[in-house]
């Protein structure tokens, strides 16, 4: 019998992958060089002070 993958087990291939993300508002750099990989079933959060660009 083959093992069935649980909904919470991470997959080998990320479902979201970002490399070198940069976001600027005029002369202000909100995000610079972010690399991120999210696998299926993972939960994460982004923390930072108000006005730091988390929503971006």
Image (tube, helix red, strand yellow):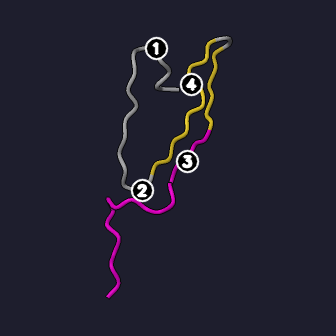
Q: Are marks 3 and 4 in contact (CB under 8 Å)?
A: no
Give residue 24's quadrant in the image.
top right
Q: Would you say 22 lies left or right of 1 here?
A: right
Q: Which residue is mark 2?
A: 40
Give residue 3's quadrant in the image.
bottom left
Q: Which residue is mark 3?
A: 17
At a point 61% along the width and 34% down the height, the residue shown is 21
Q: CA distance from mark 1 to mark 4?
A: 11 Å
Q: Are marks 2 and 4 in contact (CB under 8 Å)?
A: no
Q: Is residue 11 magenta?
A: yes
Q: Position of residue 49 (x, y in %)?
A: 39, 16
Packing grade of label 2 (10 A; few <14, some 14-19, many >=20) is some
Q: Position of residue 36 (x, y in %)?
A: 51, 42
Q: Which label sits on residue 31?
A: 4
The vertical placement of 18 against 53, above or below, is: below
Q: Which residues are magenta?
A: 1-19
Q: CA distance from mark 2 to mark 4?
A: 24 Å
Q: Is residue 51 magenta?
A: no
The vertical placement of 16 against 35, above or below, is: below
The vertical placement of 32 against 41, above or below, is: above
Q: Quadrant of the N terminus?
A: bottom left
For marks 1 and 4 on the same chain, the one whose residue lies earlier in the sequence: 4
Q: Which label sits on residue 41?
A: none
Q: Would you say 7 lies left or right of 30 here?
A: left
Main secondary-structure element of the magenta-colored stretch:
loop
At a point 34% along the width and 61% down the height, the residue shown is 9
Q: Which label sits on residue 51?
A: 1
């Amino acid at each position: 019998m083959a093992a069935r993958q649980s909904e919470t087990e991470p997959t080998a291939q990320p479902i979201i992958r970002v490399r070198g993300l940069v976001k600027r508002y005029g002369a202000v750099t909100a995000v610079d060089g972010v690399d991120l990989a999210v696998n299926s079933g993972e939960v994460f959060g982004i923390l930072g002070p108000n006005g730091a660009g988390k929503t971006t």
